[in-house]
Image (cartoon, rainbow, N blue to C red):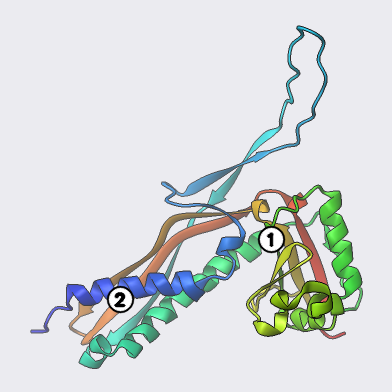
Amino acid sequence: MATPISQAFVKQFEREVHEAYQRMGSKLKGTVRSINSVEGSTAVFQKVGKGTASTKSTHGMVPVMNLEHSAIECNLQDYYAGDWVDRLDELKVNLDERQVIANAGAYALGRKTDEMIISALGSATQNVIADSATGLTKDKTLEAFELLGEADVPDDGQRFAIVGWKQWSDLLKINEFASSDYIGSDELPWQGSQAKRWLGTTWIPHSGLPTDGGSVRSCFWFHKTAIGHASGSDIQTDITWHGDRAAHFVNNMMSQGASLIDSNGVIVVNCDEAA
């Protein structure tokens, strides 16, 4: 008869999966508007239009802005990432091996979270900059910057841009992005490639951005409130013993979804990676 897996191991494993997901699983979860602990299969994000200020006469009624309200629904989907773990004591006492398994499940779900957010960004078709057979150039960057300003997208520190690694290399060729003469030594991209700030925006390289099936990759410049991410269940881990396999099955699961809230807050920049 197999000795049941200890409760301490289960709790430790669950904690490591959750920490791995928060630490490195998703690069984009913190860049969008979020709702947690959603009950049911659908979350609703409220979208409010622009108001207009008016004058009033003495003792007159205060004018009403008549704000346009709309509700954006976000459907949650269930995702799983599981694997078998052979019943070897080494896997239960060796910290490195346990972390390898925990990280694998957390990273898989983290990539799914980013995939949902990127899919929502890709549904924005209102402001698209054509590839023009070029990579990510200074001219494209400034054009996107202008579009954000013309759309009255707030410059409040909550703008984000995600680009492919080829486009990150293109940015490193732009002095205003890479030189301390323009951005100061604290913002140099050479100190790390996870993210950097430029033009009031946090720039993030990402390997999961879509292509047109060829060499043209879509990059996105957006405001945090333009995309909604809903979570009905953060990562949960279930570990069960299967005697016929002499192994434990480790199942990581979550229920999440993402939706486009305001297409005005998203600029799509298409870049030709063959250029």
Would residue 87 be seen by someone viewing this image from the given angle?
yes
Image location of residue 187, percent across then percent down: 71, 74
For the point 50% across and 47% down, the residue is: 42
For the point 75% across and 50% down, the residue is: 154
Residue that mark 1 sits on: 121
Give SS at disc 1: helix
Q: CA distance from mark 2 to mark 1?
A: 33 Å
For the point 88% across and 73% down, the residue is: 138
The mark closer to the camera, 2 or 1, is 2
Q: Is residue 234 left or right of residue 33?
A: left
Res 20 label: none
Q: Is residue 129 above or below residue 52?
A: below
- Quadrant location of the N terminus in the rendered image: bottom left
For the point 20% across and 74% down, the residue is: 8
Q: Quadrant of residue 45?
A: top right
Q: Quadrant of residue 192?
A: bottom right
Foreground of the two, 72 or 7: 7
Please give the count of numbered marks on the rendered protein: 2
Give SS at disc 2: helix
Image location of residue 2, percent across then percent down: 11, 84
Residue that mark 2 sits on: 13
Q: Is residue 200 left or right of residue 246?
A: right
Image location of residue 125, percent across then percent down: 78, 57
Tag 2: Cα neighbours inside 10 Å, few (<14), some, or many (≥20)? many
Q: Amino acid at mark 2?
A: Phe
Residue extending farthest to the left is 1
Would residue 135 be seen by someone viewing this image from the given angle?
no
Q: Is residue 98 above or below residue 51?
A: below
Image location of residue 18, percent across then percent down: 39, 69
Q: Amino acid at mark 1?
A: Leu
Foreground of the two, 245 or 96: 96
Q: Is residue 246 left or right of residue 122?
A: left
